[in-house]
């Protein structure tokens, strides 16, 4: 490993997640959180720094400076060109052992979850996963990481007193603060670091890459049409898809539909699925269990369609339609289509 360790410096680290040279926005959310933690801890005496792994990813380091990192540890090597757990976990763990950050924050994305647990295991430290709030405990001056527990009914604040770094993952768009604005003019230090691994050390090979257009980006979708057990079967999903297409949105589901194998897990919203904040969330045939609500309750506008007027989803809905989704949704589609056709004729 190259680079000059500067022992004694206190640091908060954020792992910048990137895919094919594109940084995941959760990385910038976490840099914003790291800056707030640093000022709560000790202001200027704590450095907010970023760790970036990949190949040909140096331009992302410049972005990290704009979001508040003062230094980026850059492991840029062909062996890191695609994400694989082993080289990434080994790379980050070695960096941590050398520079000893007090706190390490990682996005709770699919990749971040995979990586964070492997790093925590290697470093024999604690990991608080899926946090909804990060703060500094005023008495102890250490990370107070809050996350839901007992099925989302309680919030637990977890301290990691004895081991370092204190690790936490946070799901995209969960932190209550808005996405920090990038500074137009910011610079910092890039510290290149060798990964210390070659292709021969890695037992995993990539056989196929699923193209981006086949992947679902629920977290940043402006409109979500979500279906629940009220659909009655997988045959109802194309109906949701037609409404989503008309609204420029995507389809999501509650967990029973994933458990039943009707649709893949990346469509699931909720405690064990994704957290979303669309402008419009249509919940059709979803009762509104707390484990579902924690994933979508912050949507700007919630339209609930349910034939049970007592369904809990109506308590958080901005607009509720009591009725059979198989009558309501086709009517919504018909009216939207008519509006669209009318607009087309008027032109
Ligand atoms: P139901 O609760 O069965 O509700 C179906 C609704 O459809 C009812 O309100 C009914 O009135 C209505 N309905 C039926 N037919 C029609 C029709 N034709 N037209 C209109 N309305 C109709 N759930 C999640 O969603 N996401 C999670 O991440 C998640 N994580 C969990 C984690 C844990 C640890 C646990 C214990 C549970 C979790 N769950 C999660 C499950 C959760 O508790 C609920 O069981 C689930 O959300 C219920 O899904 P649902 O609303 O689709 O089904």
Image (tube, rainbow, N blue to C red):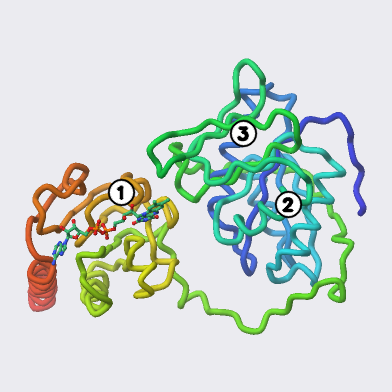
Q: Residues within 10 Å of mark 2 (few under 14, many from 20)?
A: many
The residue at which mark 1 appears reads as: 299
Residue that carries the numbered disc 2 in the rendered image: 119
State the image coordinates of residue 318 (x, y, percent, origin top left): 17, 46
In the image, residue 279 above or below residue 149: below
Q: Mark 1 or mark 2, which is nearer to you? A: 2
Q: CA distance from mark 1 to mark 2?
A: 33 Å
Q: CA distance from mark 3 to mark 2?
A: 23 Å
Q: Residue at x 11, y 47 (%)?
A: 310
Coordinates of residue 212 in the picture (x, y in percent):
51, 74
Q: Secondary structure at mark 3?
A: helix
- Write the residue at 81% across / 72% down: 202
Q: Give the structural element (helix, strand or loop) at label 2.
A: helix
Task: Say if 325 sits above or below 7 in the image.
Answer: below
Dot 1 or dot 2: first in sequence order is 2
Q: Secondary structure at mark 1?
A: loop
Whole-angstrom CA distance, mark 1 to mark 3, is 26 Å
- The image quadrant that residue 49 belongs to is top right
The earlier-in-sequence mark between 3 and 2 is 3
């Amino acid at each position: 490993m190259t680079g000059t360790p500067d022992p004694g410096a206190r640091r908060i680290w954020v792992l910048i997640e990137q895919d094919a040279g594109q940084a995941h926005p959760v990385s910038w959310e976490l840099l914003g959180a790291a800056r707030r933690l640093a000022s709560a801890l000790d202001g200027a005496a704590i450095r907010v720094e970023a760790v970036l792994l990949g190949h040909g990813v140096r331009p992302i380091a410049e972005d990290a400076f704009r979001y508040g990192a003062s230094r980026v540890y850059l492991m840029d090597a062909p062996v890191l060109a695609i994400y694989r757990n082993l080289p990434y976990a080994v790379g980050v763990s070695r960096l941590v052992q050398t520079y000893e950050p007090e706190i390490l924050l990682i996005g709770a994305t699919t990749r971040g979850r995979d990586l964070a647990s492997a790093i925590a295991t290697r470093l024999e430290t604690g990991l608080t996963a899926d946090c909804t709030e990060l703060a500094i405990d005023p008495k102890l001056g250490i990370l107070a990481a809050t996350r839901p527990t007992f099925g989302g009914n309680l919030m637990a604040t977890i301290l990691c007193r004895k081991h370092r770094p204190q690790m936490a993952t946070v799901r995209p768009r969960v932190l209550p603060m808005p996405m920090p604005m990038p500074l137009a003019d910011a610079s910092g230090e890039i510290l290149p670091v060798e990964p210390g691994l070659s292709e021969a050390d890695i037992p995993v090979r990539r056989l196929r890459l699923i193209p981006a257009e086949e992947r679902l980006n629920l977290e940043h979708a402006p409109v979500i049409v979500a279906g629940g057990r009220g659909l009655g079967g997988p045959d109802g999903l194309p109906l949701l898809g037609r409404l989503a297409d008309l609204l420029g949105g995507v389809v999501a589901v509650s967990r029973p539909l994933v458990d039943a194998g009707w649709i893949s897990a990346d469509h699931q919203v909720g405690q064990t699925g994704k957290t979303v904040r669309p402008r419009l969330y249509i919940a059709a045939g979803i009762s509104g269990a707390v484990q579902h609500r924690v994933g979508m309750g912050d949507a700007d506008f919630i339209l609930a369609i349910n034939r049970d007027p007592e369904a809990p989803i109506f308590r958080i809905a901005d607009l509720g339609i009591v009725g059979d989704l198989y009558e309501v949704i086709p009517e919504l589609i018909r009216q939207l289509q008519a509006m669209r056709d009318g607009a087309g004729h008027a032109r």
